[in-house]
Image (tube, coloured by chain):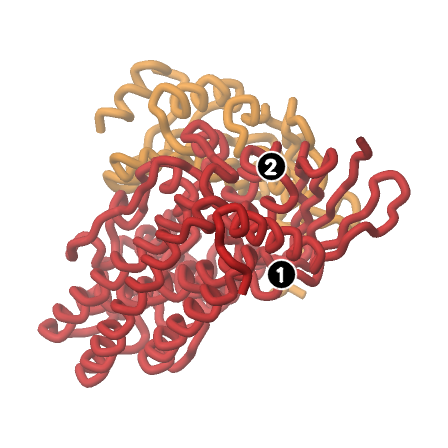
Chain colours: A red, B orange
């Protein structure tokens, strides 16, 4: 059979940044995968060395538009670890609330897009509709739907007013019922189960080998979550649990993300109740960062964000190393995509949740020898949606 | 800390210094020749997760920190290795940790550190940069200095 290369990217918005994947296919089967990155390398680590400690929080928010509060929390944790700063209790709860709201909207975004790839546009419409009120809360609390600029070394920048708390609670209560409906609809659907179960399986050994984190690891039964393992913000002050699944396939990843949404709501609700009772500052004044080094971690929606900072006592970091979760999650494609069909690869790539906005534009399939175009992005999406349709037919569903 | 005692007992004088920043953050300094043995022990025997490695240019030498996480205890162990700046090379740990592949490639192109026995040490992020230009080295121009 003729071998073909399927290039995905570079400007392919399945991913947080433009990246390039070459799928080596033998017929329908993927036999190897290659990753090239750097198309959107903005040199943030280098830029960070030229900014004041306080300015860096704004800079690193721009690393990712979806988890734009995760990096600042991780960075603040790192600097606070370096300077041995304890933040006020009120700030701890506010950090948790903003962090969890972000997780909610990020997971709903994923569910919607995963539905779209599979040809379930209803799921896409629902999930994105329910995501909207969360962005409204964000706008109300922080002033922005995205890039919230809430985190600051020593605490948070803005307070959450008591009047807002009641409104947030009301919106969340409404959301809970809808979310339960969506979760039930997605997890009980026989077609989705047929399409996602056993696809792109990652074993515990794969997770250890590649150092994968977040929902990708938890879906394979690896019980890690920085929020619990390395408590910070208010995560050790409220009741919640870490969700894990054992199968490691794309379905498990969906289960983990959907159930995590409910845990997030639990955390936010408890934090809001406490926030009403706690008086005091939202930040302490930090005038000077001593020399030394610090490590900060935060469980972003996609997994552990890792920041390492070093100071020489001046107003700027000497070194600021950032490791985003997708950097270790993406190489797992080597384990999960090989042996699968091209129709399934779209959802496996999406299963890791590298941020995406407008997938189909960049995929084009070329013949490996002649470089002639065989399919483009739309065709690949069609392949994936076609497969769902076939399964539907086999299961006896009628075409509407 | 018990686990650090285990590492110290196993490697004795090979651990050149131990620095506890606090009870969850430990920095161990080792020689670059002992790296593979120590990484093997931490990764396999202590069942740690490899987080990442970060290279730093100190001008007088280069430094690499290998960060490992012991998730059940919430401890981060950072192995500190100093290497010569004029000839920065060190054994690759990809034979032990598959996930280090791209992390080492990144350090190779941003700091110019050569990883020996790395299966595919080629440029990964900065395809169009001039040869021999390593942006994260302290003597390469940064935005503030320009």
**Measuring 40% from the left and 40% from the top, which residue is drawn there?**
A217
**Measuring 62% from the left and 35% from the top, which residue is drawn there?**
B85
Label 1: element kind = helix
- Mark 1 is surrounded, within 10 Å at the Cα level, by few (under 14), some (14 to 19) or many (20 or more) other residues, namely many
Instruction: Tell me: residue B23, above or below residue A73.
Output: above
Q: Position of residue A384 (x, y in %)?
A: 61, 51
Q: Is residue B90 visible?
A: yes
Pointer 2 indicates a residue of which chain? A
Q: Nearer the viewer, residue B44 or B126?
A: B44
**Measuring 35% from the left and 36% from the top, which residue is drawn there?**
A246
Residue bearing mark 1:
A359
Instruction: Please give the label number shown on residue A340.
Output: 2
Residue A284 is left or right of residue A357, and the answer is left
Q: Position of residue A145 (x, y in %)?
A: 43, 77
Residue A268 is left or right of residue A293, and the answer is left
Q: Nearer the viewer, residue A298 or A372?
A: A372
Label 2: element kind = loop
Q: Which one is earlier in the sequence, the residue at label 1 or at label 2?
A: 2
Quadrant of residue A204 within the rendered picture = top left
Q: Nearer the viewer, residue A27 or A108?
A: A27
Quadrant of residue B124 within the rendered picture = top right
Quadrant of residue A148 within the rendered picture = bottom left
- Mark 2 is surrounded, within 10 Å at the Cα level, by few (under 14), some (14 to 19) or many (20 or more) other residues, namely some
Q: Position of residue A263 (x, y in %)?
A: 25, 56
Q: Quadrant of the N terminus of chain A?
A: top right
> Can you tell which of label 1 and label 2 is closer to the viewer?
2
C-alpha distance separating marks 1 and 2? 20 Å
Q: Position of residue A73 (x, y in %)?
A: 36, 60
Instruction: Tell me: residue A101, above or below residue A384.
Output: below
**Measuring 49% from the left and 59% from the top, which residue is drawn there?**
A115
């Amino acid at each position: 059979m003729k071998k073909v290369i399927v290039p995905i990217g570079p400007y392919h918005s399945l991913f947080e940044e433009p990246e390039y994947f070459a799928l080596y296919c033998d017929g329908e089967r993927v036999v190897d995968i290659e990753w090239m990155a750097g198309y959107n390398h903005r040199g943030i680590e280098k830029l960070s060395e030229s900014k004041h400690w306080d300015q860096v929080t704004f800079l690193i928010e721009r690393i990712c538009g979806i988890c734009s509060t995760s990096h600042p929390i991780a960075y603040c944790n790192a600097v606070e670890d370096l300077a041995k700063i304890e933040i006020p209790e009120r700030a701890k709860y506010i950090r948790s609330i903003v962090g969890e709201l972000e997780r909610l909207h990020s997971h709903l975004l994923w569910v919607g897009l995963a539905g779209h790839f599979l040809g379930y546009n209803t799921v896409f419409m629902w999930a994105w509709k329910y995501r909207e009120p969360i962005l409204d809360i964000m706008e109300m609390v922080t002033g922005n739907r995205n890039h919230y600029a809430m985190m600051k070394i020593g605490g948070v920048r803005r307070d959450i007013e008591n009047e807002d708390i009641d409104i947030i609670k009301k919106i969340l209560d409404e959301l809970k019922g809808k979310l339960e409906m969506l979760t039930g609809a997605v997890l009980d659907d026989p077609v989705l189960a047929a399409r996602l179960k056993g696809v792109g399986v990652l074993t515990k050994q794969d997770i250890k080998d590649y150092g994968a984190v977040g929902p990708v690891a938890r879906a394979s039964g690896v019980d890690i979550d920085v929020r619990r393992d390395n408590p910070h913000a208010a995560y050790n002050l409220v009741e919640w649990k870490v969700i894990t699944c054992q199968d490691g396939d794309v379905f498990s990843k969906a289960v983990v993300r959907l159930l995590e949404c409910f845990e997030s709501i639990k955390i936010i609700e408890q934090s809001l109740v406490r926030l009403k009772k706690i008086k005091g500052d939202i930040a302490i004044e930090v005038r000077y960062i001593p020399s030394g080094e610090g490590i900060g971690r935060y469980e972003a929606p996609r997994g552990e964000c890792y920041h390492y900072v070093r100071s020489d006592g001046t107003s700027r970091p000497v070194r600021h190393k950032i490791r985003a979760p997708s950097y270790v999650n993406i190489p797992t494609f080597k384990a999960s995509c090989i042996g699968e069909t091209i129709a399934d690869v779209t959802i496996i790539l999406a299963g890791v949740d590298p941020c995406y906005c407008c997938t189909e534009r960049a995929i084009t399939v070329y013949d490996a020898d002649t470089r002639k175009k065989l399919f483009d992005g739309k065709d690949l999406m069609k392949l994936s949606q076609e497969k769902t349709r076939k399964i539907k037919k086999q299961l006896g569903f009628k075409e509407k | 800390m018990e686990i650090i005692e285990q590492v110290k007992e196993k490697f004795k004088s090979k651990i050149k210094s131990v620095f506890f920043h606090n009870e969850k953050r430990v920095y161990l300094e080792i020689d670059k020749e002992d790296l593979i043995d120590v990484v093997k022990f931490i990764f396999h025997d202590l069942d740690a997760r490899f987080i990442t490695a970060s290279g730093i240019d100190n001008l007088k030498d280069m430094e690499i920190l290998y960060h490992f996480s012991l998730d059940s205890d919430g401890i981060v162990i950072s192995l500190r290795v100093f290497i010569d700046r004029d000839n920065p090379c060190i054994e690759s740990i990809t034979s032990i940790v598959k996930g280090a592949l791209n992390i080492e490639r990144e350090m190779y192109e941003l700091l110019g550190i050569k990883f020996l026995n790395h299966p595919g040490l080629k440029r990964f992020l900065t395809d169009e940069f001039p040869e021999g230009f390593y942006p994260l080295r302290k003597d390469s121009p940064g935005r503030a200095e320009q």
